[in-house]
Amino acid sequence: MEFLNEVKEGFIQAVKSCFDTDLNSGEVLINETRKEFKGDFTFVIFPLVKKLKKSPAEIGDMLGHWLVENLNEVVGFETIQGFLNLTLSDEFWIRVLRQINSTADYGSFPANGQKVLVEFASPNTNKPLHLGHIRNILLGWSCSKILKANGFDVKNVQVINDRGIAICKSMLAWQKFGNHHTPQSAGVKGDHFVGSFYVKFEQAFVEEYKIFQQSDAGQKLYQSEGNGKSPEVFFKEFKNQYFNQYSTLGAAAKEMLIKWEQGDPDTIVLWKMMNSWVYEGFNATYDQMGVSFDALYYESETYLLGKKAIESGLNKGIFYKEPDGSVWINLEDVGMDRKILLRSDGTSVYITQDIGTAQQRYEDFGVEKMIYTVADEQDYHFKVLFEILKRLEEPFADGLYHLSYGMVDLPSGRMKSREGTVVDADDLMQEVIEEARSVSAERGEIAALPQSEQDEILRKIGLAALKFFIIKVQPRKRMIFDPKESVDMQGQTGPYIQNAYVRIQSVMRKASSFDTTLTDEYTTLSEFEKTLIRNIMQMPDVIREAGKTYDPSILANYAYNLAKEYHRFYHEVRILNAETDAARAFRTTLSENTGKVLLKVFDLLGMEMPERM
RNA sequence: GGUUCCGUAGCUCAGCUGGAUAGAGCAACAGAUUUCUAAUCUGUCGGUCGCAGGUUCGAAUCCUGCCGGGAUCACCA
């Protein structure tokens, strides 16, 4: 807290002056005083006891006296056990507020000259986005914003997994069952339209597999390879192999993939058309969420990258070749396994692509940091990838970070596409907005506004409920998403925070008829007012911390606490009809700056504030 | 089995590099508006911080072991 520098310095001087001992700033422990004690800030003096060879109470009292006598900011103290509680002067608080009030873009740090790339979203093109993507996108987007506020030059990118067997399944099903329909003719959003054919493929495949299971060939297979397993278990385990070796649908899909890889014109045309439908759908979803990208990487363009890296790795002796021609790296010396990088047939695997893509990005942007927002099931993958890039001595190797997050579960357990429990992103957003609509209708505050304005407000409220519910949880923790709780608008929620902001805006609209210039005449600050200032003066630290740890949840919880303090203040203290003009000016300024901070933090979290609600 | 993450109130979550009597929200119950938006505020109820050791003046926090749960360990992506 830069606002407290003088007090901290004073403490060091006090120790020097009272005990003739030098302290470095790392040894100074300062906290906010707990509510149940008198004071504003607390120095913990236990650590000094050994050094100074005196009792905690004695040290606290001596330092407290010295500080009151020598520091203008300190007007009182109390020593309780090993804690020195200081009370700071009203001038101090007003000065802090004045500083915040006059700081343009308070909470943002100056450019630090470093470039960072943040990857998030990265969907497959065979299905629409779901709840898991929402967590991913919120985290990536918010981290991107937070890093910008910390002075980085940030590029947002996503990798679109637009090739492979999955999209071929959709393509095949569309050929078979599509009747030349398009999203437009069917009246369905493009990504959902394509996704429905993926589902149709799976259904047809399951049918085909069932028939196979009952056929002579299937029964014979079970007899010879069943090994005493029940037919159910056996055929479940055999499914993949069936797809690859027996299925006609599987063969057709694989053939389509091969045609795609050979650049067969008809296949490419179909592929482009269906992907374009998907992108249209994705873009609508991204718009609704309020996120955007600086660059897109398509897997169809990057999946062959990384071969050069194989060469150079082999030359450097980091990789080795097996007799069958496959290329490997051995990471057993750092507690990992052997990992294949090139198959014996010379084709590359996923991680090879990632090596190449990372190099490509470095060439494209010259970033020294890259953040990958990917679920924690890929923790090991990224550990391996980063280790390989380090051994290849890539210049960006030290700036790699896997922003790993836990899966989203439903109260009933994991989302499973087979059981139809996957929560669709578009549906979900629509639901929370509708919930906001019905809550709003009961209140009637915005009923007089034009419909388009109302819609915009309801969108902001609904999405804030959803987004806050997700982003308040620490990324690495697995979270349980209860749809019923996610639409709550009371208590620890996004709309609660918006409501604090809206109250402030309402006050400020009415305050415009007064002179609200801050003066030093107001000298009877209440605890509510001090607590609010104490909160808003923390913002830069919280933003820095969130940036250092890539953790937006810190900011989410901060915003909630600040909103809560404001609601309490609002309830307990008269603002516009304050007892004096000075008090009114102070409180409106305090309110305005609280609003400023809430707005800023909300923006960093990827949420918007309505002016009314 | 190896590696790794998680375990805090009935439920969902906070708890910063160790600091005072472990906090919020939801749920349940009881209150508050002649006054700036009641999506608000106040109060009551609710805890063996998974268990056991260790380090420390001090441990939910750090270390070790155990228990429970998830993820991962493919010539898949």
Image (tube, coloured by chain):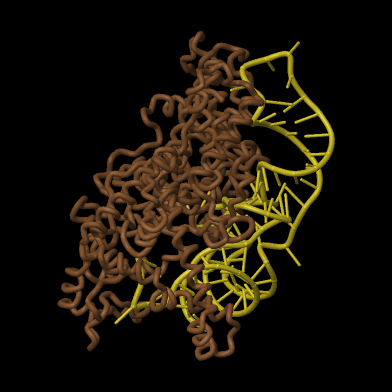
The chain in yellow:
B
Q: Residue, x 56% and y 45% (percent of image)?
A: A469
Residue A290 visible in image = yes
Q: For this view, does A600 lie left or right of residue A299?
A: right
Residue A65 visible in image = no
Q: Residue A204 in the image: x percent, y percent?
A: 47, 64
Q: Residue, x 47% and y 35% (percent of image)?
A: A537
Q: Residue A590 in the image: x percent, y percent?
A: 52, 24
Q: Nearer the viewer, residue A59 or A445?
A: A445
Q: Residue A461 in the image: x percent, y percent?
A: 54, 33
Tag count: 0
The image shows residue A235, relative to residue A467, as above or below, that is below
Q: Residue, x 49% and y 18% (percent of image)?
A: A520
Q: For this view, does A334 lie left or right of residue A431?
A: left
Q: Nearer the viewer, residue A144 or A267?
A: A267
**Which residue sits furthest top?**
A513
Residue A362 found in image quarter: bottom left
In the rendered image of this protein, which colour is used for chain A?
Answer: brown
Query: The C terminus of chain A lies in which quarter of the figure?
Result: top right
The image shows residue A468, relative to residue B73, as above or below, that is above
Query: The N terminus of chain A lies in which quarter of the figure?
Result: top left
Residue A333 found in image quarter: bottom left
Q: Residue A314 in the image: x percent, y percent?
A: 18, 77
Q: Residue, x 30% and y 45% (percent of image)?
A: A154
